[in-house]
Image (cartoon, rainbow, N blue to C red):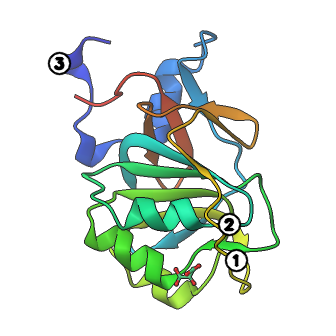
Amino acid sequence: MPAASLPPLASFATCDFCDVHKGDTSGAFRVLPPVFRHFGGVASFAGPVTTVKCHEDNTQVKAAVESPGEGSVLVVDGGGSLRRALVGGNLAAAAARNGWAGIVVDGCVRDVAELNAEAVGIRALALMPLPTERRGEGQRDVAVLIQGVPVRPGDWLYADADGIVVSAQPLHG
Ligand SMILES: O=C([O-])CC(=O)C(=O)O
């Protein structure tokens, strides 16, 4: 699609993106499996991706949301662990304060009321009240697999009420 006919960022719809790209077998356009629950005070969000890969240790997630987000989406590959929460109210507040558009966690979050009060979009598999032990582990800005789907730093991620799509190129004008 020529850039002139792309929708503005403020009014994107993941269904519209899927209508246009449903035949794309190149791997540039990807749809995450529909297993994510919606949290945070922002229903739809989009932005360039930065990543954290970690296992039941949110050291790098905390470092990321405490740094400038500049409208980015933080994608956290927590390996799908349901045993610890990688984001809670404090980290969600930091993300909102620092200008992150959203956080997608392949893992758990906690403090649901606090998450929903923050001006940031959040997707995660489930709620889990148990926090992590921070041991300084985890990686920043590596290619990750989210529910089996590759997500790379610099991809664009779009999340709305219908789902989450990831693209190697921006899908908005
Ligand atoms: O601090 C943590 O590990 C997670 C948490 O509860 C918060 O962000 O408030």
- Label 2 sits on a secondary structure element that is loop
Relative vertical location of residue 59 with respect to residue 6 in this rendering, above or below: below
Q: Which circle, 3 or 2, is nearer the viewer?
A: 2
Looking at the rendered structure, the secondary structure element under dot 3 is helix
Identify the residue position indicated by label 2 in the image. Answer: 57
The residue at the far left in this view is 4
Crowdedness near tag 3: few (<14), some (14–19) or many (≥20) residues, C-alpha within 10 Å: few
In which quarter of the view is residue 42 placed? bottom left
Check whether the beta carbons of the residues at disc 1 and disc 3 lie within 8 A of each other. Answer: no
What's the distance in space between the residues labelled 2 and 1, CA to CA?
Answer: 6 Å
Q: Is residue 90 left or right of residue 70?
A: right
Q: Position of residue 72 (x, y in %)?
A: 34, 48
Type of amino acid at the residue the image marks with label 1? Glu
Q: Is residue 106 left or right of residue 44?
A: right
Residue that numbered label 3 is attached to: 4
- At numbered mark 1, what does the secondary structure look like: helix, strand or loop? loop
Q: Answer yes or no: do the residues labelled 2 and 1 have beta carbons within 8 Å?
A: yes
Residue bearing the label numbered 1: 133
Residue found at x 71% / y 43%: 33
Q: Earlier in the sequence, mark 1 or mark 3?
A: 3
* Three-letter code for the amino acid on which mark 3 is drawn: Ala
Q: Quadrant of residue 69?
A: bottom left
Q: Confirm if mark 3 falls within 8 A of ligand 1.
A: no
Residue situated in front as seen by the camera: 63 or 89: 63
Residue 3 screen position, x and y as percent: 22, 17
The quadrant of the rendering that contains the N terminus is top left
